[in-house]
Image: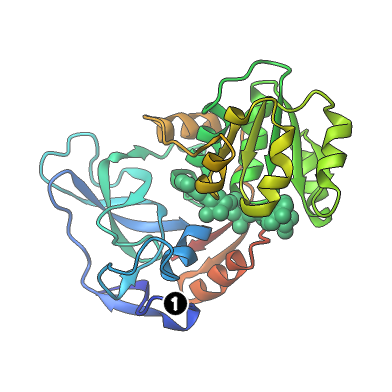
Amino acid sequence: MSQVFVFKDYGGPEGQQLIERDIPTPGSGEIAIEVRAAGVNPADWKRRGGAFGTRGTLPAAMGLEASGVVTAVGEGVDAFALGDEVLGAPARGLGAFAEHTILDASATVAKPEEISFTDAATLPVAGTTAYDLTHQVEIEVGQTLLVLGAGGGVGLMALQIAKVHQFRTIGVASESKRDLVEATGATFVPSGEGVAERVRVLTPDGVDLLADLVGGDALRELAPLAKDPSVIVSAADGETAVELGGAGRERSEGVLGTITGVVQHGLVDPHVVQTYPLERAAEALAEVETGHARGKIVIRP
Ligand SMILES: NC(=O)c1ccc[n+]([C@@H]2O[C@H](COP(=O)([O-])OP(=O)(O)OC[C@H]3O[C@@H](n4cnc5c(N)ncnc54)[C@H](OP(=O)(O)O)[C@@H]3O)[C@@H](O)[C@H]2O)c1
C-alpha cells in the first residue's frame, strides 16, 4: 500500500485527506515512480473547488507536477529504465501528492543531476507556464515585458527567463515581494491603486508583452498599457485576456525539456520557499490557496 493525498468532495479543503491505495502500476506508454517531490499549484485547489468541472471520479488524487525515481516501466517504453530520475505530470489523474504515482512517458523528461528533486518538481506546471508565457508573443532584446503577479511561482520564473533573453522586465506584485522581484533584475512596481499610472511612468510608449498571472480587474486595469491587445497573454484568466484582444496560455511542444535545460544551466532558479512532508500537504495547499505565495511551495513525501 502507498499513501496519496485526495479530495473526497468538490468544494473546500475539508474534503481533503491522506488515504492508502495500492501502488499504481504503469500501463502502456507509462512509467511508475516513487515520488520524491511534488509542486503545489493554484490549479490544485481550483480543481478541488470544481473550477474544471465536477464530474471526475472521487476521491480524486491531488498534485499536478512531480519528480521521482522510476520503479516500473510499462509496455512500449524505451526512453526510461528502473532507477532513472525523472520529472513530469502525473497520468490518469493519479496525483503527485503521493508516495507513488504514474507518469506518461511521452510527457516525462530525465532529471539532470544539477537539478534537485525539489526544484525539478516545479517545472512540469509552473516552469512550463513561465516559459510559454514569455515566448507566446515574440519580442526582442531590449523590449519590455510586464509581469502581473510577479512574486508567485510562475511570475518569478517568467522574469528570470525574460532576463536570459535580455528583455527589459517590470514586475507588479505586493510590496512584500519587492526583494524577490528585484532579485531577478526586474523593476518592481507595487500592485494596488494607481498601479497603471506607476507602470506608465516607466514605459510611456507601452509594453511589448503583458504576461498575466492574476486576471480579472487587475488585468483589465493594466491592459491599456499593452502596445497592442494581441500582446496580452494570461495563464490565470484566458477568458478576460481573449475579451481584451489577447490570448490564454498556449502550451508549446517540447517545453518541459526546454525549461529543464534552462534550469540545469543555472539560468533560472524556481525559488522554492518552503517544503512540507506529505502528512502536512493540507498546510502546503492552504498556503498556496491564500493567493499570496512567495515563489514555490513543494511537498516532499
Ligand atoms: N493555464 C495554465 O496552464 C496555468 C499554469 C500555471 C498557473 N496558472 C495560473 O496562473 C496563476 C499564477 O500561478 P502561480 O503558480 O504563479 O500562483 P502563485 O504562486 O499563487 O502566485 C500568484 C501571485 O499573484 C499575486 N497577486 C495576486 N493578486 C495580485 C494583484 N492584484 N496584483 C499583483 N499580483 C497579485 C500574488 O502576490 P501578492 O501577494 O504580491 O499579491 C502571488 O504572488 C494562477 O491563477 C494559476 O492558476 C495557469
Q: Position of residue 59 (x, y in %)?
A: 30, 75
To which quarter of the image does residue 266 belong? top right
When the figure is inspected, residue 161 is found, relative to residue 116, above or below; the finding is above
Left or right, 282 with respect to 205, comes to left
Say which quadrant the C terminus sits in. Answer: bottom left
Q: Please, which residue is most extreme toward the bottom here? A: 14
Q: Along the line of sight, which residue is nearer the eye, 228 or 294?
A: 228
Task: Indicate the amino acid at tag 1.
Answer: Gly
Residue located 81% across and 57% down the image? 176
Answer yes or no: is residue 150 visible: no
Left or right, 157 with respect to 255, comes to right
Residue located 29% across and 62% down the image? 94
Say which quadrant the N terminus sits in. Answer: bottom left
The residue under label 1 is: 11
**Regarding mark 1 in the picture, which secondary structure is present there?**
loop
Q: Please, which residue is most extreme toward the top here? A: 141
Left or right, 271 with respect to 18, comes to right
Left or right, 111 with respect to 156, comes to left
To which quarter of the image does residue 234 belong? top right
Q: Along the line of sight, which residue is nearer the eye, 72 or 206?
A: 206
Q: Position of residue 209 (x, y in %)?
A: 65, 29
To which quarter of the image does residue 32 belong? bottom left
Q: Position of residue 194 (x, y in %)?
A: 86, 48
Residue located 48% across and 29% down the image? 261
Answer yes or no: is residue 14 visible: yes
When the figure is inspected, residue 81 is found, relative to residue 191, above or below; the finding is above
Number of numbered markers: 1
